[in-house]
Image: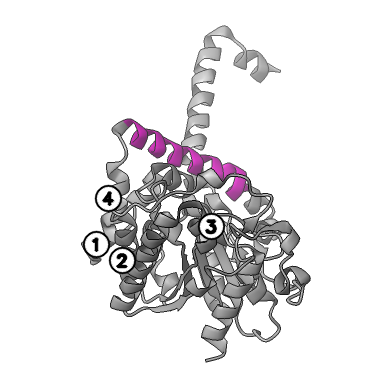
Amino acid sequence: MKFIDSFYKTKNLSNNGKFIAVVCIILLFFGNILIPNIGPLSETKQIFTLNGKNIKYNDSPEVSQFFKSIKQNNGFLCLGTSESGSIDGGNYYNFLNSDPDIQNSKFSILAGAGRTCGLYIPLFLQHKKELNNLKLIYFINPVYWGNNLCDVSPNYWERYSNYQMTRVADFNNFDAEIYSPIDDYYNSLNVFLKSKLTIEYFLYKQRRAYFHDLKYVINPKSYPNQFAFISNSYRNLALDSVCINNPDINELDTVFNISKSFTHKGWFSQVNTESNYRYKELRAFIKLCKQLNINATFILGPINKRFILNYASSDLSAYNTVTENIKRILLDEKVDFIDATDISPKIGAFEDHQHHSSYGGYLIYQKIKSHFYEK
């Protein structure tokens, strides 16, 4: 009772409030130091994909465990843009994981609109050890040479990779060319945006200490529940389904080779013949893979030739030129690659002007399987 009376004395309230405020501030700003990270996973299964924020802020230890789980299971990491996202009926990595003939390898995925190879450079530089000897497949979509996508995009960088996270990447002993896509990104930002993104980074890390680290310190058994592991649930696609072997012509606009449900033909973008950014980005990523000893295979993806021919036939030549330029880079760099451009005119292979369909994904899966397992 005496303590309560003393605590609530007017002359003590101010000092008590200051003390409590200081303690709260210390806990807020030093929570990420005071609260320990959960230990490494005991799971040996391969992680299928990661939460986007894990990659954006390079969360530890999740990102390291993701890469390690792929290597431990002799797996592949597939990287791509929007064409490599989830598709009703399955995409190429789903079919690979469902194939009973492929028992010794599984396929993980990181993909999203605008998630081009340059965005992974800062992340990869912070995981050199885990990436050594990693088997990687990167899907190159030539539509990213179009006017609307051909240059550095601060919006896509902000979506997938925080500015402050990129700044801690170690570029020592690496070719300057590898740094060039990140330098272009930095040059697109003003000081106010850099400050905003830096504050965002530190606030995220502080919040994560309480809403993530502390949660799993209290209940460590629930830690694996945040991951999607490759298991039988990823191996249940019927490879003989009707939509794969016999695309439903009634659902297709066969003139433009798109789904009838796609009504935005005006989204088509002409190729930009002056911008060099995507070529530079691809070369930088190839050099990084070589220096990090990543076993990279590149897929040169198809373009919807029927759509381009009927919508703007004069642009087909420019798209073909871009495709040949990409192929020349892959040949000059002497990297392993799969040429999927012969899928370009196939009926049913596309959902719209720039994304392949599940049937297209099946055709790409066949090429990957043949490349790695039927040589």
Instruction: Look at label 4 and name its amino acid.
Output: Asp
- At numbered mark 4, what does the secondary structure look like: helix, strand or loop? helix
Counting residues from the start of the chain, the first of labels 2 and 4 encountered is 4
Labels 2 & 1 near each other (Cβ < 8 A): yes
Rounded to the nearest angstrom, the CA distance separating label 4 from label 1 is 10 Å
Number of the label disc, if any, that sits on residue 307: 3
Task: Indicate yes or no whether the magenta region holds residue 308.
Answer: no
Labels 2 & 4 near each other (Cβ < 8 A): no
Instruction: Look at label 1 and name its amino acid.
Output: Glu
- State the residue position of label 1: 177
Counting residues from the start of the chain, the first of labels 2 and 3 encountered is 2
Please say whether residue 202 is visible from this viewpoint: yes
- State the residue position of label 2: 283
Q: Quadrant of the N terminus?
A: top right
Number of the label disc, if any, that sits on residue 183: 4
Nearest the camera: 244 or 46?
Answer: 244
Counting residues from the start of the chain, the first of labels 3 and 4 encountered is 4
Q: Which residue is at 38% across, 39% downward?
A: 198
Q: Which residue is at 31% across, 41% downward?
A: 188
Give the percent coordinates (x, y) of residue 289: 36, 71
